[in-house]
């Protein structure tokens, strides 16, 4: 099968057409999709309308599934979705709109910050797959940033400076940026901070990328003010409009991105009026096409 691939941005992001992943997610098809991801880092595949089982099956072709903890719930409160699915929605366990004061709503506020999925986990996270099940009529877009192109445009002295630097990443740091302070000890214990390099070569393409996220609290072995200033400088540089693309969702869209060379964020919408049901699977390790 030959897919139709249309670039959507001068640097990255493409739309893929000519495939129905509900019925055809063979290794050959997924190998073509992964090749497109190597080039474009983000691919948008419209009109897929995957259910949970289908989304999981497609994801498993791209790597080993990670499992969602879906923090923010009260003790004893059930999850809305099965553990293979990250709940990127404004809905409660009964599929109603979350109340304004609900902890889960506060937890998801940090999704509006630039980040990379699971950079706060000690695992080789690769792809995220997000499906739009119900989308609001306005707002709620997803912005992406190309961390390869941003790195390549850095001044050479700054590239050299970053070569041996690492930063600590913590989900609790990014949540605190959005006012989250009511974390329980049992929640914090599930995800201690991890260290990530500031530069990383992609294992397949060998292109170097900046490794940034709102989860990055500080650079190791650097004074606090200098560390924060450098992280802020890099974040500002990497999210200039020329490195960014905004995806406006339609119901049925599947968007896949490579966390090893992109950042993303959600944009605001009226979450007390409109329903937004988004479900994410995230994988780690090599895909079947890589083995």
Image (cartoon, rainbow, N blue to C red):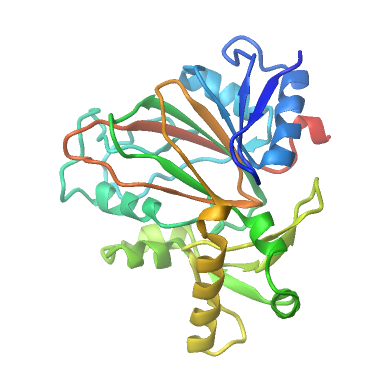
* Residue 187 shown left or right of residue 68 in the figure: left
* Residue 198 shown left or right of residue 253 in the figure: right
Residue 202 horizontal/vertical position (percent): 75, 52
Residue 118 visible in the current orientation? no
* Residue 276 shown left or right of residue 25 in the figure: left
Name above or below for residue 263 compared with residue 230. Answer: above
* Residue 228 shown left or right of residue 5 in the figure: left
Residue 127 visible in the current orientation? yes
Residue furthest out toward the bottom: 223
Report the front residue among 65 and 258. Answer: 258
Toward which corner of the image does residue 99 lie, by quadrant? top left
Name above or below for residue 41 compared with residue 164. Answer: above
Q: Pick the quarter of the image with the C terminus.
A: top right
Name above or below for residue 54 compared with residue 192. Answer: above
**Residue at the image position 56 percent from the left and 54 percent from the top:** 242
Toward which corner of the image does residue 279 lie, by quadrant? top left
Residue 283 horizontal/vertical position (percent): 61, 39
| Numbered marks: total | 0
**Residue at the image position 60 percent from the left and 16 percent from the top:** 21
**Residue at the image position 61 percent from the left and 58 percent from the top:** 122
Residue 163 horizontal/vertical position (percent): 74, 74
**Residue at the image position 67 percent from the left and 17 percent from the top:** 25
Residue 162 horizontal/vertical position (percent): 69, 76
Q: Pick the quarter of the image with the N terminus.
A: top right
């Amino acid at each position: 099968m030959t897919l139709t691939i249309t670039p959507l941005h001068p640097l990255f992001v493409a739309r893929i057409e000519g495939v129905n992943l509900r019925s055809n997610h063979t290794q050959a098809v997924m190998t073509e999709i992964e090749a497109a991801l190597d080039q474009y880092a983000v691919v948008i595949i419209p009109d897929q309308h995957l259910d949970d089982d289908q989304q999981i099956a497609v994801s498993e072709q791209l790597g080993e599934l990670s499992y969602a903890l879906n923090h923010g719930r009260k003790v004893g409160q059930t999850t809305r979705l099965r553990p293979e699915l990250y709940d990127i929605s404004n809905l409660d366990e009964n599929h109603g709109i979350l109340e304004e004061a609900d902890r889960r709503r506060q937890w998801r506020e940090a999704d509006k910050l630039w980040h990379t999925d699971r950079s706060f986990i000690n695992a080789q996270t690769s792809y995220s797959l997000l499906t739009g099940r119900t989308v609001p009529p306005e707002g709620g877009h997803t912005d992406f940033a190309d961390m390869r192109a941003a790195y390549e445009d850095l001044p050479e002295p700054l590239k050299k400076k970053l070569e041996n630097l690492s930063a600590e990443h913590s989900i609790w740091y990014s949540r605190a940026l959005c006012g989250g302070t009511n974390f329980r000890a049992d929640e914090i214990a599930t995800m201690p901070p991890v260290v990530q390099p500031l530069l990383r070569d992609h294992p397949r393409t060998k292109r170097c990328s900046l490794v940034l996220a709102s989860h990055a609290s500080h650079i190791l072995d650097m004074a606090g003010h200098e560390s924060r200033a450098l992280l802020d400088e890099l974040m500002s540089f990497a999210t200039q409009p020329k490195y960014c693309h905004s995806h406006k969702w339609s119901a049925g869209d599947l968007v896949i991105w490579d966390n090893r060379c992109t950042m993303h964020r959600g944009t605001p919408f009226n979450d007390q009026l409109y329903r937004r049901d988004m479900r994410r699977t995230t994988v780690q390790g090599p895909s079947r096409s890589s083995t």
